[in-house]
Image (tube, helix red, strand yellow):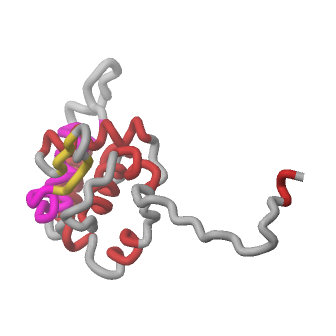
Amino acid sequence: MQLTQFTDLGLRVVMRLAVDRSDTRPSSKEIAQQLSISYTHVTKVITRLSEMGVVDARRGRGGGLAITELGRTASVGWITRRLEGEGEVVECEGSNPCPLRAACSLRSALKSAREAFFASLDTVTVTDLTAPPNRGVLLALPDLGAPETRTPQTGTGTDSSAR
């Protein structure tokens, strides 16, 4: 089964926030830059994760994003089900209904397979996803919110670019 891009991005955001120290609250823009994701997509994902109670999003001074306790302990299956929605794997009805739908068992087989997929994800928590070695990779993402430090240049004292 292939996850939607929305779910993929949602899981990435949750993993990224799960490794933050409790005193840091990155902005949506910082998360988008760190994960190389469109800011627009990130804001939509964060809105949904916030509605689910997985992410605490605050605006303004002292605001930013933080994962909630529910977000840390939630199973990946639970999060994925809510981000994916209740849609079916195949579209048997709709504007162009399948002529085989009356006697076809594919729909129920795919529904069972989808549930088995989610059930396998129910055994994994967000905390599991952010344990070593993944934690090291997540912590190595550039800290775009930190002030930039510059090393003073030593030399002749003249600026050669002004010539």
- Give the image location of residue 24, x and y in percent: 26, 60
In front of the other: 86 or 38:
38
Q: Is residue 44 left or right of residue 112?
A: right
Q: Inspect the magenta stretch and tell me whether residue 1 lies in it.
A: no
Estimate the x, y position of residue 127 in percent, counting from the top left.
Answer: 19, 70
Residue at 25%, 26% (x, y): give it.
93
Q: Which residues are magenta?
A: 68-90
Q: Residue at point 28% right, 22% down? A: 94
Residue at the image point whose x is 77% and y is 74% from the top: 155
Which residue appears farthest toward the right when viewing the image? 163
Asked if residue 68 lies left or right of residue 41, the reply is left
Tell me: residue 61, above or below residue 161.
Answer: above
Query: Quick check: is 74 in the magenta stretch?
Result: yes
Q: Position of residue 120 (x, y in %)?
A: 19, 66
Determine which quarter of the picture holds residue 66. bottom left
Query: Up-down: is 96 above or below 61?
Result: above
Q: Position of residue 153 (x, y in %)?
A: 69, 70
